[in-house]
């Protein structure tokens, strides 16, 4: 931990001083934005209260020096990939400089620094990185057991789960940023009592509450990433909603895993909260029950055991079209915690690279649905409504087994701990559009 974690230091930017903000001076997450209403180019920004620090502009009007300058130089493109490739020392140096410039201890340059601030209301957020590859894990034992018991009642948790961080390769082209509408996909399904499959709009559309991890410098092809090196190889985390068509999934998933049930859309929040900002919220890795196997040595280290977890409270809210018309707030359907995951972010990356798989800057890894042991900690409707058997009721009296057209799903995440400044992730949301009428 360093001075950028000191909860006593405030920013001179008024909105960053609010105890409610997700983005106090101690957070400083990175993203890519574009000013609204101009033919503006995408620019790298850092969130601070309700403002965005335009890094390129700041570097022009008040240049950074030394290692921080290397970071700012790498922030002049419309994605964060070059900055992610620059590595932890550079990320950290730029963060420390930003912290100093925008802390209340800075008194001489404020009028100049103000020129680099853009109100969030004047900006449109874009995908923060150009995603080369996207992988989705499956690392909550509670989610895996619940879902497994629905699909395979006699054999809910497959024997590899406690040895391997399970994952499948997703599709990078499907990843969209918060606010992007999601069209209900069509596909092939077969109900148990139907003699043959049919093709049409999914009837069991779901969301999944997940955390996304973005890879930093990565590795050389053929070279694994050691468990302890993963910490300098993950730049930061975001919220991720892995939209899922359960009826397509059920018919297609064996023997090779998810395919069209998952690759029509995956929504992420726009701000990457750095591992450095998350440092105060580290937690022990999941406490494995007695009798569970220890991770193999390549997935194990003292540091990972003691502080491999991250304490992030995650909430999912549903808002129907009628709720929004009646100006009702989103209805919270679950609240879970990321520290309940069976595998850590470090173990996921170390396992992914253990065969020498080439991990590149900007690659996105999803954690898998974050579900806890309690019913209100379940991170998708499949579990919350137990495959539609126990519908949930919204404040309007409407009920939901799965998502309907017009529904909006919003994920939120925050980290809180005594003696630390609370930080948050912003929002990850999307509205469901009706299925397409034809082909394009
Ligand atoms: Ca998933």
Image (cartoon, grey):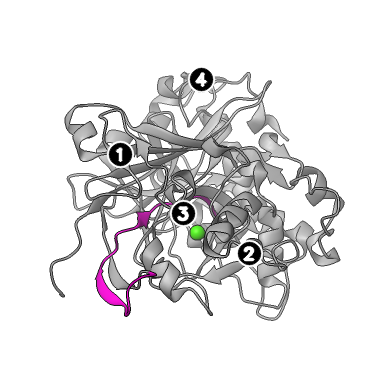
Where residue 2 appears, x then y in whole percent? 71, 34
Residue under label 1: 399
Q: Secondary structure at mark 3?
A: loop
Q: Are marks 2 and 1 in contact (CB under 8 Å)?
A: no
Up-down: is 435 above or below 371?
below
Q: Earlier in the sequence, mark 1 or mark 3?
A: 3
Q: Earlier in the sequence, mark 2 or mark 4?
A: 4
Which residues, given as a range, are shown in magenta?
192-212
Query: Residue 107's mark?
Result: 4
Does residue 57 appear to the left or right of 423 in the view shown?
Answer: left
Q: Secondary structure at mark 2?
A: loop
Which one is closest to the eye, mark 2 or mark 4?
Answer: 2
Up-down: is 315 above or below 33?
above
Residue under label 2: 154
Which one is closest to the eye, mark 1 or mark 3?
Answer: 1
Alpha carbon distance from label 2 to label 3: 52 Å
Q: Nearer the viewer, residue 208 or 418?
A: 208
Q: Earlier in the sequence, mark 2 or mark 3?
A: 3
Count of picture labels: 4
Q: Secondary structure at mark 1?
A: strand
Q: Nearer the viewer, residue 373 or 16?
A: 373
Residue under label 3: 75
């Amino acid at each position: 931990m360093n001075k950028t974690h000191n909860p006593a230091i405030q920013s001179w930017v008024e909105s960053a001083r609010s105890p409610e903000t997700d983005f106090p001076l101690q957070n400083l997450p990175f993203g890519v934005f574009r000013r609204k209403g101009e033919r503006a180019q995408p620019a790298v920004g850092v969130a601070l209260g309700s403002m965005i620090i335009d890094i390129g502009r700041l570097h022009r009007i008040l240049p950074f020096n030394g290692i921080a300058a290397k970071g700012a130089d790498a922030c002049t493109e419309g994605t964060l990939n070059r900055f992610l490739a620059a590595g932890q020392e550079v990320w950290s140096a730029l963060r420390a400089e930003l912290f100093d410039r925008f802390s209340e201890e800075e008194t001489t340059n404020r009028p100049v620094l103000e020129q680099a601030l853009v109100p969030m209301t004047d900006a449109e957020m874009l995908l923060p990185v150009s995603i080369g590859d996207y992988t989705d894990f499956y690392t909550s034992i509670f989610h895996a057991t619940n879902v497994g018991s629905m699909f395979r009642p006699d054999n809910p948790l497959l024997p590899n789960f406690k040895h391997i961080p399970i994952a499948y390769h997703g599709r990078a082209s499907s990843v969209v940023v918060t606010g992007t509408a999601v069209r209900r996909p069509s596909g092939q399904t077969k109900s148990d009592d139907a003699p043959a499959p049919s093709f049409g709009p999914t009837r069991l559309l779901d969301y999944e509450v997940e955390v996304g991890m973005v890879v930093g410098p990565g590795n050389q092809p053929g070279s694994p990433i050691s468990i302890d090196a993963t910490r300098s190889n993950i730049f930061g985390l975001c919220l991720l909603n892995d939209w899922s068509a359960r009826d397509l999934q059920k018919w297609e998933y064996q023997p090779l895993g998810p395919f069209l049930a998952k690759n029509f859309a995956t929504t992420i929040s726009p701000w990457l909260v750095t591992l450095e900002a998350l440092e105060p919220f580290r937690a022990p890795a999941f406490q494995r029950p007695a009798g569970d196997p220890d991770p193999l040595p390549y997935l194990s280290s003292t540091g990972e055991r003691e502080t491999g977890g991250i304490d992030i409270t995650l909430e999912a809210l549903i808002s129907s079209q009628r709720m929004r018309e009646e100006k009702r707030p989103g209805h919270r359907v679950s609240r879970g915690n990321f520290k309940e995951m069976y595998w850590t972010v470090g173990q996921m990356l170390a396992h992914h690279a253990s065969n020498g798989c080439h991990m590149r800057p900007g690659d996105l890894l999803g954690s898998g649905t974050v579900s806890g042991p309690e019913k209100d900690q379940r991170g998708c409707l499949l579990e919350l409504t137990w495959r539609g058997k126990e519908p949930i009721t919204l404040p309007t009296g409407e009920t939901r087994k799965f998502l309907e057209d017009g529904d909006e799903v919003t994920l939120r995440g925050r980290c809180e701990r005594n003696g630390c400044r609370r930080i948050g992730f912003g929002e990850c949301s999307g509205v469901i559009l009706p299925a397409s009428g034809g082909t394009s």
